[in-house]
Image (spheres, coloured by chain):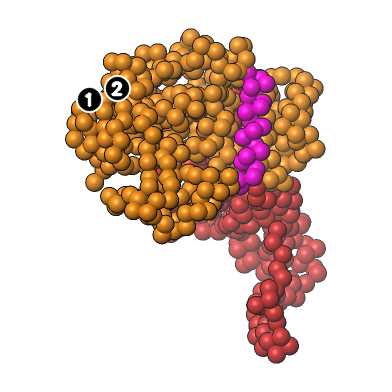
Chain colours: A orange, B red
Amino acid sequence: MTAKANETGATAGVYAPPAAASGSPEGTPVSLRNLSRAFGATKALDGMSLDIAPGELIALLGPSGCGKTTALRIVAGFEFADSGEVLVNGKDVSGVPAARRDMGMVFQSYSLFPNMSALDNVGFGLRMRKTATAQRRSKAAELLDMVGLSAQAGQYPHQLSGGQQQRVALARALAIEPHVLLLDEPLSALDAKVRLQLREQIRTLQQRLGTTTIFVTHDQEEALSMADRVGVMRDGRLEQVADPSELYSRPATAFVAEFVGTMNRLPGELAGPGTVTVLGVSCAVIGHGGHGGAGSPPIEDGLTSGPVDVLVRPEGLTVAAAEGGNGIVSGRTFLGATTRVAVLLSSDTEVRIDVLSAAASAMPPGTSVQVGLPPTPVLVAPRQQ
Amino acid sequence: MATLTPTAGQAISPDNSKKRRRPRGRSSVWRWVVLIVAGVYFIVPLYAALRFAGLSGFKDVFTTPGFGSSLWLSIRLAAVTWIVSMLLMIPTTVYVHLRMPGLRRLLEGVTILPIVIPPVVLIIGVLQVMPLALRASVWLLALEYVVLAMPFAYRALDAGLRAIDVKTLTEAAGSLGAGWLSTMWRVILPNMRTAVISATILIVALVLGEFTMASLDLKQTFPVWIVLFDQENAQISVAASIFALFVTWVFLMLITVIATRQSRRTGGGEVTLFTVAPQQTIGN
């Protein structure tokens, strides 16, 4: 599938950075140009292009095998692209070995050197740069203090918890004042509470230091909460690069729509270009003036008329108890202020709808309800069998 | 660390505890029986040897011609074998782990060959193809010992590498600016210390006790000297054997204790001959 230009993408297939990233202007710009990499018959990367602004934190999000880690490893210098180039500060670093790229990396598995204390781990990169011992120790101590681990400076990795180890790894990566900080699913091995704390800490530090950062994750919550922009990847290509709110509210493709957040599929009928009938309502199709501007291509190539699936978020539908309505409540999940109500429609389709918990209490399972759709622009996708 | 406390469902009643204690007591008795039988098996011959050698045998052994030179030769051979084995095996195992993990099985198969092929066959083959200059040299034996020690050295090093995430550690060091040599010296080798010590123990024990190859190679190593001198004075020969056993045992214990202490300091396991305990972590 071809990457679609969107409001943040300047030209087709190349995702340009926003005018001003939230990070410091001292950060380093990074560009990936048409990167391709195959492992045997499998294409891990298929012409990926991306521009990252100085100081920007960009998250590469996607399912396993989509190529996000391969892209990160190519930027780090641990893998080489079959074609394409990686530009850091405008210079192609494709032929530069990893040791000379000045990129700090935090790995998924705890990668601290077991034979060194936390302080020595943090100082390792400086030692490789032949920094004087006193200066090195002082800088390492400062970094450990920054991640809140001064008291653990003398401890060895086996004496630290997983969260502490990743914080030391972060301090170690930042100690060399890298051009780019690369985070390869650094939170995935941690428990939920530690993960939440650490992601806030990473974001705060990144913004404070203004380091251009590429963050690879398969966890959409992590990506949406931390990144300035999120690039959703599929089959070695970027499907969409946008800021989190746009990605959620205006996904460019059905894949992005369904990968990010929860999405309902409702049977609809394309009634000519740009109009779809669903639940008895006629709605504009996103990409036909509803979104993306007049003249934008349809959201899914080749969809002009006939049966389609309409994609709607749980908060995009309305539901109310009604005798002889078009659905029956089949279940409820309490989420706090809201409750997700599952409704089986007469078309044998189940949809999930978010309603205020107070209203949901009046709709126990078995209640006949009327599900509606406000006449707002919607996404369509080929009908799923 | 989880504590072991019985849950409500597992509460041990007095009757249950009796039932449980009985098999434990029986196994404890068996443990002692096995220990005593094994102890007798090892100690009786040693005691008999000590009785046979007598005090005079131990007094004379150090001044007997050939004792010092043969022991010194064995020690030098052990040192050279160790150095060559380490220079050869460490880079090989690391490289295979990092770049050619698919070759690990093949390498395992190849390294087991010296165990499968009898030393007599090996040495005759080597003597046929080696140039005369090397055949006359005592260091040919060290090269042969390298081959003989290969299965043990490889397995110890391989186990050590499997206990650490070599790939990630290498990449982490690389991303911080370390070249190949720095990564090996500062990151990989220190974390293989336990494995290297295990390999050392095996190599030293093997070389100090090897007889067949040295004998066929016509080199008077310490075990060869013991056998030859046995025909002249059996008492001194037995005293020398016990002395060699004692020295080897002390040496190996020393290495094990020091290595285990260093290993534990950085979270590693106990140093043993074949196994290397994985790094300890304390969870999230």
Give how far across and how far down residue B234 sits, in percent. Answer: 67, 69
Q: How many marks?
A: 2
Residue at the image point whose x is 58% and y is 45% from the top? A337
Residue at the image point whose x is 65% and y is 47% from the top? B284
Q: Amino acid at mark 1?
A: Pro
Mark found first going from the N terminus, 1 or 2: 1
A186, B257: nearer the viewer: A186
In the image, the segment drawn in magenta is A191-210
Q: Quadrant of residue A288?
A: top left
In magenta stretch: residue A272 = no
Q: Are marks 1 and 2 on the same chain?
A: yes
- The residue that label 2 is drawn on is A288
In magenta stretch: residue A200 = yes
Q: Quadrant of residue B81?
A: top right
Q: Amino acid at mark 2?
A: His
Give the CA distance from mark 1 to mark 2.
8 Å
**Subunit bearing disc 2:** A
- The residue that label 1 is drawn on is A273
Residue at the image point whose x is 62% and y is 15% from the top? A24
